[in-house]
Image (cartoon, grey):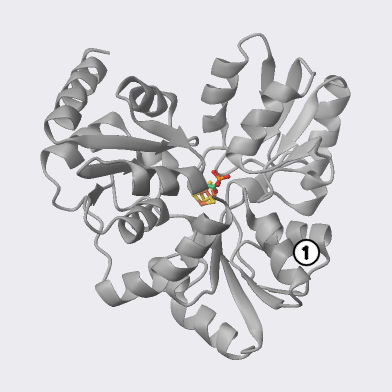
């Protein structure tokens, strides 16, 4: 506890002296989200983290999340120093979509509009026409479909399948997945629902279709938090990273939130509803980044940045 308090006090001092802001994702651990709140920083989903990072007037952003979030911040704010607690914090979607293969896939279908999820490298974004996050993916694809566009979608196959089903759009899918959401099990969820028949089911669309089909609300982290407040239920079963409980419980302390089950048939979970890369964002790592930026700073090549900025700007203007 003493060590924790020491890091919190030091981080607060360093954030002030460096005119730095802590921007955290809802999947980071509760003490990181609490620290972002206490220091006048920001916690949100990936879309609003990007917008906030661009618009805030700090000299330095410290992005507690995963690497694509830091890269997005740097692409949108090249004049800012963008630090991450660790550059090792990646994402299975980013890892599963190497730019060479993805570009070759796009080259085979030159008549398609390329829409990529924000959970990708700067190089993949640079190859895309649009970047989207889960909070606006449906609206963007609906719009493109209404314009008669055929779409290449990457990398999350579950989110892609959900959007294709909702919109009826013509979508060619890259076959990536989030290791956290992919583990939620419809069979185990069905068993759990029998125990809590009055609970509403909240599902992030990176989950398999069989789980999404059981949802009372489907959406991005921000959209799920809103649903947990607006739905009349007292109980919720939540199929997304457990980091989200910090905000859900804070906004609705009288409600009860249960983790949706992973595995099923006795299978043991690997990520167990918490992203191993999000979990790397500890207090000590934030302190280290603020003390010595070496190995913590995000750099994006200028040419790549210019190309990746276009589809990112398109996303931000679309959702403004
Ligand atoms: P959102 O916060 O945009 O819903 O993204 C979820 C996610 O996968 C972050 O890793
Ligand atoms: Fe990637 Fe899934 Fe972790 Fe989000 S929760 S960073 S999508 S692996």
Report the residue at 82% width, 49% height from top: 210
Q: Secondary structure at mark 1?
A: helix
Residue 160 in which image quadrant: bottom right
| Label 1 C-beta lies within 8 Å of the nearest ligand 1 atom | no
The quadrant of the image that shows the N terminus is top left
Give the vertical position of 292 relative to 156 (above or below): above
> In this rendering, would 86 be left or right of 122?
left
Q: Position of residue 44 (x, y in %)?
A: 48, 37
Q: Extreme top residue here?
A: 254
Residue 68 in which image quadrant: bottom left
Name the residue nearer the viewer: 270 or 94.
Answer: 94
Q: Is residue 132 visible?
A: yes
Give the vertical position of 249 relative to 202 (above or below): above
Report the residue at 77% width, 69% height from top: 146
Q: Position of residue 296 (x, y in %)?
A: 21, 50
Q: Position of residue 84 (x, y in %)?
A: 28, 46
Report the residue at 88% width, 25% height from top: 194
> In this rendering, would 309 be left or right of 74?
right
- Disc 1 marks which residue? 164
Q: Residues within 10 Å of mark 1 (few under 14, many from 20)?
A: many
């Amino acid at each position: 506890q003493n060590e924790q308090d020491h890091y919190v006090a030091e981080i607060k001092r360093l954030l002030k002296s460096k005119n730095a802001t802590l921007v955290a994702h809802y999947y980071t651990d509760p003490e990181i989200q609490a620290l972002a709140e206490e220091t006048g920083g920001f916690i949100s989903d990936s879309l609003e983290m990007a917008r906030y990072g661009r618009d805030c007037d700090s000299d330095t952003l410290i992005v507690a999340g995963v690497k694509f979030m830091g890269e997005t911040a740097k692409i949108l704010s090249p004049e800012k120093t963008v630090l991450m607690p660790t550059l090792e914090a990646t994402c299975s979607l980013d890892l599963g979509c190497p730019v060479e293969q993805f570009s070759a896939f796009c080259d085979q279908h030159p008549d398609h509009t390329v829409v990529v999820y924000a959970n990708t490298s700067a190089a993949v974004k640079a190859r895309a026409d649009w970047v989207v996050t889960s909070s606006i993916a449906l609206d963007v694809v609906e719009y493109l479909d209404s314009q008669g566009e055929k779409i290449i979608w990457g990398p999350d196959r579950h989110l892609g399948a959900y959007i294709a089903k909702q919109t009826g759009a013509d979508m060619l899918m890259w076959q990536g997945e989030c290791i956290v959401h992919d583990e939620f099990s419809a069979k185990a969820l069905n068993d759990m629902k029998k125990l809590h028949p009055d609970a509403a089911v909240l599902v992030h669309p990176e989950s398999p279709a069989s789980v999404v089909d059981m949802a009372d609300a489907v959406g991005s982290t921000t959209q799920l938090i809103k649903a947990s407040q607006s739905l009349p239920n007292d109980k919720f079963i939540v199929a997304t990273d457990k980091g989200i409980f910090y905000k859900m419980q804070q906004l609705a302390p009288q409600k009860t939130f249960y983790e949706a089950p992973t595995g099923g048939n006795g299978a043991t979970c690997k990520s167990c509803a918490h992203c191993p890369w999000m979990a790397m964002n500890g207090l000590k790592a934030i302190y280290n980044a603020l003390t010595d930026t070496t190995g913590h700073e995000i750099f994006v090549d200028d040419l790549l940045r210019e190309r990746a900025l276009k589809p990112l700007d398109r996303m931000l203007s679309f959702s403004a």
